[in-house]
């Protein structure tokens, strides 16, 4: 009986493992591949209507116009006929939490934040679950890379950039510990209606105190890093990169005053790489952001306006307003169900097209611009010779949910599986409804 119980336990654990594990990561590219005839969206605003894209050993070797004479020999390559289709660089999630939580209701699968107010030394990358079923569901929409960002506290920790097909966090990491994230104090707050308070906006009476506490923490860190450092202080050490330019400062701020104060604070601290995250009212201070060379990771496009006097389409129009001002902008998915909704990143970009941006400008929001802000544009974000062959083929416009049908996807030249729990369910129930009809 005991032996039978042990067998049952083993089978149960095996079922759990099989149900939660994703596909085996794709093997390294062996043979050169040529994708011929597709419309190539380079990611920098350029488009080649009839292209040849060749990649080998995980790197792009040629991006050519197929309508012009060329001396390329493709006899030894695997050739993909993509006439009538589209090629894109892999889409990149900004300010994401994919891989840090698997099931919100299961506490053991949640590694989103740490206790405490100031945690610059917390490394999100070591908590990243490369085998998350949520992560693998990104690939069929062309979302292949992302930033892993901790949440919680005033200084939430350090972010890293990963690719979405790996055995573990070491294999997934593209750029580690390159950004510190700060939640800027809100200059306004809403009353607690459940306590009978007025639910309207009112000034945050502790705002100045909270800003001063943050400034004191930064100043103490600078003093520590200039000193003997005889006793190690990991949080202060983690901030050192902000002052020597090796790390990026990402500041979550939404209101106009908070954004302005946050940028002035970072400048006064000697921080050179600054990005506003969220930036609900960033368009109101666009010229200020441009003058200070501050980029913006713009909050999820598919959200409702927050203020009573905002236009109904306020959130849809902000990307164009910032792009027209010459600001480097990417899109981020934070908010309700943000991990699952990250797969909708291309459709957020598509919405900005309906509100003024061109399709190639919208594409840049989730490719080249995101790569630049994260500091990975030397290898990712565009289809250019020498860069990583992280790209995909779509049957149609990848920014339109009706035509984003990905037939092939590659990360560093590795041919990815596009099978996920969601695609299995789709196949299962599509057959069911065919039968019932």
Image (cartoon, grey):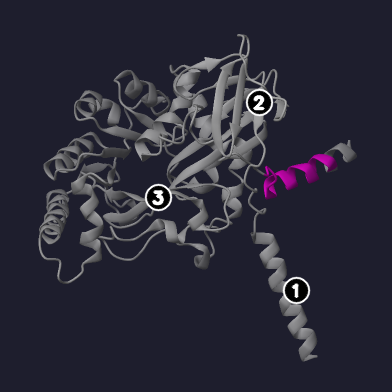
Q: Determine which quarter of the picture holds residue 239.
A: bottom left
Residue 162 screen position, x and y as percent: 47, 48
Position of 38 compared to 387: left or right? right
In magenta segment, residue 425:
yes
Return the mark for residue 11: 1
Closest to the camera, between mark 2 and mark 3, is 2
Query: Disc 3 versus disc 1: distance between alpha carbons?
Result: 36 Å
Query: Disc 1 versus disc 2: distance between alpha carbons?
Result: 44 Å
Closest to the camera, between mark 1 and mark 2, is 2
Return the mark for residue 35: 2
Q: Earlier in the sequence, mark 2 or mark 3?
A: 2
Residue 198 screen position, x and y as percent: 27, 46
Numbered range of the magenta stretch: 417-431
Residue 224 screen position, x and y as percent: 13, 61
Q: Is residue 306 visible?
A: no
Q: Determine which quarter of the picture holds residue 81.
A: top right
Q: Verify CB contact (< 8 Å) between mark 2 and mark 3.
A: no
Q: Verify CB contact (< 8 Å) between mark 3 and mark 1.
A: no
Crowd around label 2: few <14 · some 14–19 · many ≥20 (10 Å): many
Task: State the residue in front, 61 or 301.
Answer: 61
Q: Earlier in the sequence, mark 1 or mark 2?
A: 1
């Amino acid at each position: 009986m005991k032996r039978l119980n042990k067998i049952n336990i083993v089978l149960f654990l095996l079922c759990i493992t099989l149900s939660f594990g994703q596909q085996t990561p794709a093997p390294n590219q062996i043979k050169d591949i040529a994708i011929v005839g597709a419309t190539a969206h380079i990611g920098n605003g350029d488009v080649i209507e009839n292209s040849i894209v060749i990649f080998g050993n995980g790197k792009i070797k040629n991006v050519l116009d197929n309508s012009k004479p060329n001396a390329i020999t493709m006899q030894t390559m695997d050739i993909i006929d993509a006439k009538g289709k589209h090629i894109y660089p892999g889409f990149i999630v900004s300010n994401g939490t994919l891989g840090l939580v698997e099931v919100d209701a299961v506490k053991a699968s949640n590694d989103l934040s740490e206790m405490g107010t100031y945690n610059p030394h917390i490394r999100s990358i070591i908590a990243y679950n490369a085998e998350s079923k949520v992560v693998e569901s990104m690939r069929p929409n062309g979302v292949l890379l992302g930033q892993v960002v901790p949440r919680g506290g005033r200084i939430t920790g350090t972010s890293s950039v990963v690719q979405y097909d790996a055995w573990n966090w070491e294999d997934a990491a593209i750029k580690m510990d390159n950004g510190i994230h700060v939640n800027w104090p809100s200059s306004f707050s809403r009353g607690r209606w459940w306590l009978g308070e007025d639910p309207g906006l009112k000034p945050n009476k502790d705002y100045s105190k909270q800003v001063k506490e943050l400034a004191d923490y930064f100043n103490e860190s600078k003093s520590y890093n200039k000193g003997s450092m005889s006793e190690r202080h990991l949080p202060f050490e983690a901030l050192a990169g902000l002052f020597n330019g090796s790390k990026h400062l990402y500041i979550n701020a939404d209101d106009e005053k908070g954004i302005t104060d946050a940028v002035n604070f970072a400048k006064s601290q000697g921080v050179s790489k600054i990005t506003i995250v969220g930036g609900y009212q960033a368009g109101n201070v666009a010229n200020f952001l441009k003058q200070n060379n501050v980029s913006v990771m713009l909050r999820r496009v598919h959200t409702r306006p927050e203020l009573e006097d905002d236009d109904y389409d306020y959130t849809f129009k902000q990307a164009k307003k910032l792009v027209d001002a010459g600001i480097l902008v990417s899109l981020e998915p934070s908010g309700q169900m943000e991990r699952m909704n990250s797969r909708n990143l291309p459709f957020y970009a598509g919405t900005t097209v309906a509100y003024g941006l061109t399709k190639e400008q919208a594409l840049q929001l989730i490719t080249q611009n995101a790569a630049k802000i994260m500091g990975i544009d030397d290898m990712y974000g565009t289809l250019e010779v020498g860069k990583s062959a992280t790209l995909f083929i779509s049957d149609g416009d990848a920014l339109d949910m009706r035509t984003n049908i990905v037939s092939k996807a590659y990360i560093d030249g590795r041919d990815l599986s596009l099978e996920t729990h969601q695609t299995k369910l789709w196949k299962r129930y599509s057959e069911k409804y065919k039968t019932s009809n």
